[in-house]
Image: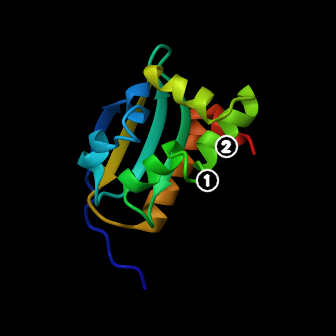
Amino acid sequence: MSPEINHVSFDAITIECDAGIFSKKNDYSRFGCVQNCFGIYLFIKKSTDEVLYVGQATEQCLKDRITQHLSKNDSGGTFRINYCKSKDLDYEGFVKIFDDMSVKCIILNIKSKSLITAMESILISALNPEFNRLT
């Protein structure tokens, strides 16, 4: 039986990105504000305000989940895989897009996988981000 949820609150945080993240052996310190937090994250192209990808962090904290997309030594996550595939880029080409990127995090005050998954699905349906639909 699921716990009763009487009240859900959330915070939204925007983290500015740039290619400098990658210049110092993947300095992810700017994502420290979402360490031990769970919820939804959106990769956004700053120049157009276009949402490129919506993801969720339920098993890992937001910091760990987001940085999986960025780390050269990781699988890259769906966003990086789809982006590189559609643009015919390698990792170095992917790094260059981050001068025009921000990450918006929606942090929930409860760790509810079903609620986070539902919110992610709603955002994907409403925003139709290009790199959520490619495989």
3 on left or right of 87: left
SS label for mark 1: loop
Q: Residue at x 69, y 29 (%)?
A: 89
Judging depth in this view, the residue of 47 and 25 nearest the camera is: 25
Q: Residues within 10 Å of mark 2 (few under 14, many from 20)?
A: some
- Is the residue under label 1 in contact with that under label 2 (CB below 8 Å)? yes
Q: Is residue 29 above or below residue 8?
A: above
34 on left or right of 69: left
Callout in the foreground (2, 1): 1
**Mark 1 sits on what residue?**
75
Image spot of residue 114 (x, y percent): 48, 66
Q: Residue at x 37, y 59 (%)?
A: 61
* Amino acid found under the numbered disc labelled 1: Ser
Which dot marks residue 81?
2
**Quarter assignment of residue 27:** top left
Image spot of residue 47 (x, y percent): 47, 13
Mark nearer the N terminus (2 vs 1):
1
Q: Is residue 106 above or below residue 22?
A: below
Q: Is residue 18 above or below residue 56?
A: above
Q: Residue at x 36, y 51 (%)?
A: 63
* Amino acid found under the numbered disc labelled 2: Ile
